[in-house]
Amino acid sequence: MEKKYTLEDFAGIIKRLRGENGCPWDKVQTHESLREAMLEEAYETVEAIDKKDISNLKEELGDVLLQVVFHADIEEEKGNFNLSDIIDGISKKMVYRHPHIFGTEKADTPQEVLQNWETLKKKEKKQKTQTEAMKSVPDALPALLKAKKVQKKAKEVGFDFENVKDALQKVHEELAELEETLSQSKQQQEEELGDLLFAIVNVSRFLQLNPEFSLTKATKKFINRFECVEQSALMGGKSLSDMTLEELEQFWVKAKYSKNPTEE
């Protein structure tokens, strides 16, 4: 029977790779050198989830686990913590933040669970103000997701729009302010563009949509339609760079209203 490796086996493999007679590449890696890989593996895992590719999901989760074990081994070498400490820490956190399961608290809905989670999180991190909670949102997050998280924390204390129409009105206001800066400095334009994007994230939150995913899908849709435009041009023996904007627009409209299964 083929050997089935365990988490302990895997941790041992990483130790050997980083050991004295280990792999030259693995031995020199640091938290900083692995930073980009950690982000990439997380996004590739999300993509597997979006595509409902279970086989690939298993592989990508393994790649995420590799990052966790790798970082843990780096710190174990320094005598700070190891993989067991990580598992112990997250286990204690899950027990602490689920008092309705492991304690005597009551939470009957997902909303109540999330409210309790955030309250316990602030207490655990000794955050005395809501501003401290906002500042704790990582800068490494994609900007759209960070904006959404900050807005949710503002909502927790009642600082929010009444409804999606009010949020949309804010978008119109910010767009008008951006238009006013077209003849002004880049700094002013950047500020107003940021305000507009922040306002759009507010709308996405009311619609219960992830702005990062929405933008990703829009970008993919643009690429698919652009491909149709380019194929139409090539079939007509033309190059995109040699076509007028009006001609490109005609192809674009045609692509927009054509049924494209990749956009579903």
Image (spheres, rainbow, N blue to C red):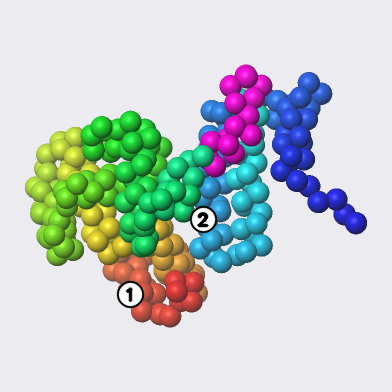
Q: On residue 253, which mark appears? A: 1
**Amino acid, disc 2:** Val
Magenta stretch: dominant SS?
helix
- Residue 216 pos. (x, y %): 41, 58
Check residue 83 for magenta coloring: yes
**Badge 1 element:** helix
**Real-space Cα distance between discs 1 and 2?**
32 Å
Q: Could you say which quadrant of the image residue 65 lies in?
A: top right
In this picture, residue 257 sits left or right of residue 84:
left
The residue wearing badge 2 is 46
Q: What span is colored magenta in the figure?
A: 76-91
In this picture, residue 159 sits left or right of residue 87:
left
- Residue 7 pos. (x, y %): 71, 43
Check residue 204 for magenta coloring: no
In this picture, residue 155 sits left or right of residue 50:
left
Q: Report crowding for label 1: few under 14, some 14 to 19, many 20 or more residues within 10 A (C-alpha).
A: few
Residue at the outermost top position: 78
**Amino acid, disc 1:** Val
203, above or below 62, in the image: below
Q: Determine the residue positioned at 56% across, 59% down.
A: 48
Q: Report crowding for label 2: few under 14, some 14 to 19, many 20 or more residues within 10 A (C-alpha).
A: some
130, above or below 103, in the image: above
254, above or below 244, in the image: below
- Residue 161 pos. (x, y %): 15, 56
